Image (cartoon, rainbow, N blue to C red):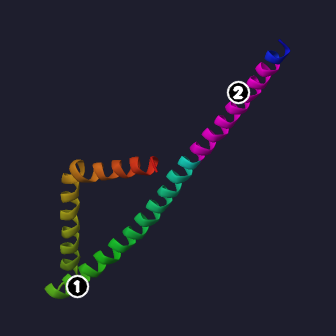
Amino acid sequence: MEDLKEKTIDMADHVEDFAQTFYKLSIIKVTEKVTNAVSGAVVVLAFATLGVFGILFLGIALSLWLGDLVQSRALGFVLGAAFFLLLFFIISILRKNLVFPFIRDLIIRKLYD
C-alpha cells in the first residue's frame, strides 16, 4: 500500500512538472509569434518609408523631365500628378482582387512561420 502511495505522489509531481513545462513552452511560443509579428511590422514600415521617399523623388524627377519635354515646368508637374492619380485609381479598382488578398496572405504566412 505504501508503494502505491509513493507512486501516486511521484505521478502527481510529474503531472505538476508537466503542467509547468507546458505553461513555459506556451509562453515561449507566444513570445516567438509576437516577436516575429513585430519584427515583420518594423521591416514593412521601413520598406514603406523608403518606398514613399523613392516614389516621391521619382515623381519629382518625372515631373521635371516632363516639364523639360513640354517646355513648361508647371505642366510637367501636372502631368506627373496625373500619372500618379491614374496609378492610384488603377490600384484602388484592383484592391479587392489583388491588394487585399496579398496583404492578408502575407499576414497569415507571417503568423504561422
Looking at the rendering, which quadrant does residue 60 occupy?
Answer: bottom left
12, above or below 65, in the image: above
**Res. 104 mark:** none
> What amino acid does circle 1 point to?
Trp
Task: Read off the magenta span.
Answer: 6-31
* Helix, strand or loop for the magenta stretch, by majority: helix
Q: Single out the residue that lies furthest toward the left.
A: 70
According to the image, label 1 marks what residue?
Answer: 65
What residue sits 18% from the left and 59% below the top? 90
Q: Is residue 39 left or right of residue 66?
A: right
43, above or below 112, in the image: below
Marks 2 & 1, CB-CB < 8 Å contact = no
User: Where is residue 41 drawn, in percent x and y?
Assistant: 48, 56
Mark 2 against mark 1, which lies toward the viewer? 2
> What amino acid does circle 2 point to?
Val
What residue sits 20% from the left and 53% below the top? 94
**Judging from the image, what secondary structure is the residue with disc 1 in?**
helix
What residue sits 62% from the left and 45% below the top? 28
105, above or below 47, in the image: above
Quick one: 85 or 111, which is closer to the camera? Answer: 111
What residue sits 29% from the left and 81% below the top? 61
- Work out how far the residue at label 2 is from the one at label 1, CA to CA, in angstroms: 74 Å
**Judging from the image, what secondary structure is the residue with disc 2 in?**
helix
Which callout, 2 or 1, points at the residue further toward the start of the chain?
2
Q: Quadrant of the N terminus?
A: top right
User: Where is residue 36 drawn, in percent x and y?
Assistant: 52, 53
* Mark 1 closeness class: few <14, some 14–19, many ≥20 residues within 10 Å: some
According to the image, label 2 marks what residue?
Answer: 15
Q: In the rendered structure, does residue 27 fall within the stretch colored magenta?
A: yes
